Image (spheres, rainbow, N blue to C red):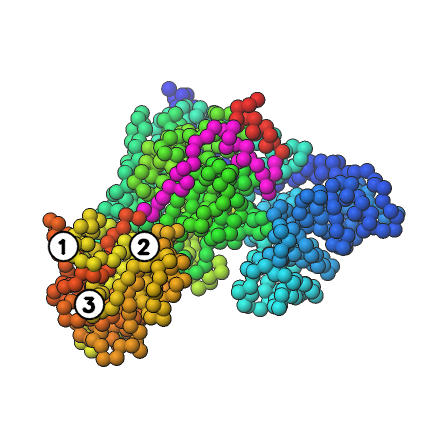
Amino acid sequence: MVMKKDITQKIKVMGKSLFFELHPSNHFVVAGRIIFLFLCFVVFSGLFSRVSYSNQPEGNIKGALSIFLREKGFLVEEGSIHWLKTHHESFIGSAGSRSKVVFLAKEGPNSLRDFYFAKVKVTPDGKIASAKIWNISSTPFACEQGLWANGKIVAVGAKDADEGGFISLTLFDFRGEDSKIMMQQNFLEKIKNSITNYQKTGEFHGIGSAYIDFKVPVHNLDVKIAKNSISIFFDDKVASIGYSSGSFYPKVKGHEDYFDFQESEKAISGNVAWIVDTVRAIDIIGKEKVGWAEAKWYRIEDFFKRTFYKTAGKNFAVQSVLDSIDRTAGGDVRGTSSKTMSNRIEKLSGESIPPVKLLEGLEPLENEGKWEGVIDDAFNLRDWTGLPSLYRTFVRPDPERPYAIANLVAWNPAMVELHVVAGAVEPRSETGRAGTGMIPRDDETMLNLLAGFNGGFQALHGEFGLMQDGKVYLPPKPWAATVAFLKGGRIGFGTWPGPESGEIPEEIISYRQNLTPLIMDSKINPYKRRWWGSSPDLNPDSPTIVRSGVCWTNSNHVIYALSSSVNEITFAQMMKRAGCHYLIQLDVNAGHSGFEFIRVAPPSVMPPLDRKLDSDWEAEGRVKNREDLVFRAKKLFKKMALMRFPRYIGTDPRDFFYLRLAKNLPGSPINPSAGEVEKWKVDFLPDSNYPPKFAVSTVHSNSGEWVKIVRSDPRWLSVMQVKDLKGIEDNEEAKAGAFLSVFSNSGKIDTFEIGTPGIVEGKKYLIFGFDKLSQEWVVDINEFHRDFLKKFDEVITVEVLGKEEIGGKKITSAVGIGPDRFFSWAETANSNPELLEQVLLNAGAREVAFLPSDTNGDGKWNFFEKVDGRIEFSPLVSEKGPSVFNGLLFIPSHRSVVVRLFPETEVVPPRVWNPPQIKRIRYPRLQDTEMLKDETGEK
């Protein structure tokens, strides 16, 4: 018994070392392996880049280079050839005179020009003996045209495929990349970076670069390169760019109106991922062999894990799970909301998210599958109501692997917005431009930021579509699982239609795709896909690895999940038990899959932390490009293997998602300069739910008068004209809401449709226009023009008065429109237009207009509730309700914040969806033909 106990203990210790402490302690061993790998790479590079002499003219080295390259399939513009400094260097496999040259060329008569860098061996008689060539631009849908150079500083212009105006200009410093990029990295990372630089650019020190993206195509472009300065002449404008040691920077501010300037960024990979990517790019080895080895390793690792935990026992597996859930603070959400919030709104907290169904055969752990609100104010921002913005739980997804754990985060998409960010390195757009890799730095985004999490596969592994804020980085793939941010603050999940429907709908602002849906209409893998990552042989027995995903649930929540040790079927089954009816699998790389809670605030506002940060999973600092703000970040769980933490508050080389609080009522506070301001109230109507449709406050002026103010959100309202009380009583949807009587002596109300004649132009109106794309009402105060009818499907107008039109009229009510989508109504008992205007301006209105009123209650705001079929009015200010019922009706709409994209897309077999999905346009790979055979089953 003693011997068995000792053996078991040794196995446990060995298992911990093998599976939980995977970070090598001896960097010299790792460095030695990397150096050996690189030497092999260089040997192969030297052996296989040698070519035979060409029939080239003597004494004309540019002509010789053109002929040499033409024989290799390149059509070179001789005028674009620029020789960098010629020098002698020793190189494995050859020695002698090697020169460096840049040029523009096409890879065939039907292709577009790209920008190339080459190292060429020149014979004493001026002939080209051999060359190794790197495509530096790789822009299949842009045509490089125009090369300006001075020494090792080069500028290259690019036009669109139709060769219209210049759309971009890229600056290069062939002296090397900015040393500050890798300054904070250790010796090992610098070695890896040098090898990657050589593989991609032919230079160990890399190439410094910066990208200029013109906002409007430029028809006349010229560049003058001087010492430490570059002058760019575009149309009738001039910009000055400075450069030093591989870095570029605008010398004068103001360029933002004409072009976006983007500095180069670096992608830092983990050691294993880096070795895989590096070896994969070597032609003699290739992606297929590396992928095969990677998949075999995952299966071997899974075998040893299962064997170890069977030997160590169930209790050890349970303890390993418990050790992994030392998470951010969670708690019971009851009692956390403000006193003005009723249970009708509180029910939209985590208590309304159905719990995750647990597996049979596993004894439930404490809180397993139960949603908890994330209440951790030092790291996470709550909604203004006091309710948590995010909820979380954990489950064990596989009874055969009791050590596996999945962490889930859920949110109400009406409270929390999901956005995508294109990476700073990849994917690249058709013009070669990458994204910023950075969450927008405006106040509204930063001060409402909640979290960031990983995106989908890198572009090399499928080129699945990505668009951010209307900028397409990768076009949509047919039959690809898609999540999109839509106009009107909505989010969409759906499967992109077949190849005949390649156009992007106008209502889509951003999208991200990955694979085919893992769950669609609650059915697992409806498209019968066999490849779900890390399985190059496409064997249905996919490896058990880290997997992540995002889904839309039956309760209209959105869930992100990160699970260890699962295959795609186990992952999908777990997500289905969580209520998912549409699931997109995201990344499956442990180092690139993860979730971070993030809070950003001015230093004086950031909640204090009464302890030291735990650097294993917590971080804080200044926000990059917003030095006036500070951040705190925290991993989803302590042992999460996400690289470069904190990752998503800085600049990331790969695409990712971020979450921020949505803009909902009550909105910004009222400036109290006009007097004391009461707290907003939102729970005064029956069946109120989140988000609020109305908010009410009272301003007690310094002069002793008071003003009631209603702020309304037309995004969540239906607006309509009614002509009598019956129009409200007979409306089955009008159970509660607001009514504004605006006829009688107040003004005129009209409903217009496109093409309506007889419009009075030049008058000032309160205008409600229904935007079909965003599925919401848009409100404005303006002079009415026919153009408004072209913008909206339906327009309702109310005549209002400008300040100069008031005269001696009695004014007890006014309306204000702010920079956000809300509109505000202010009302007082006595005529006081000056006070009404001041209160609305203090509430953030940019435009104010007035409505005259009478003693009959017309021109007044009324809330109402339908009781037993009878309408009961609650006037905002008046003692009695309206006497005339020709006016505006505002009732809660049934608008869904989550919608199904492309519901008409049918399920088709792999032989239909796979060929267009594997078609490559920017990141080609050699094994696509074999992949097609395997995926369709046609051997």
What's under tag 3, amino acid-wise? Ser
Q: Quadrant of residue 320?
A: top left
Image coordinates of residue 686 in percent, x first then y, are 18, 51
Residue 915 painted magenta: yes
Q: Amino acid at mark 1?
A: Ile
Q: Nearer the viewer, mark 1 or mark 2?
A: 1
Which residue in the protein does label 2 denote? 715
Earlier-in-chain disc, 1 versus 2: 2
Q: Residues within 10 Å of mark 3 (few under 14, many from 20)?
A: some
Q: Is residue 332 inside the magenta stretch?
A: no
The answer to whether 905 appears left or right of 290 in the picture is left
Residue for badge 1? 871
User: Vertical placement of 608 versus 63: above or below?
Assistant: below
Report the span colored magenta. Answer: 896-925
716 or 572, nearer to the observer: 716
Whole-angstrom CA distance, mark 1 to mark 2, is 24 Å
Residue at the limit of the structure toward the front, as seen here? 757
Give the x, y percent position of residue 392.
Answer: 33, 42
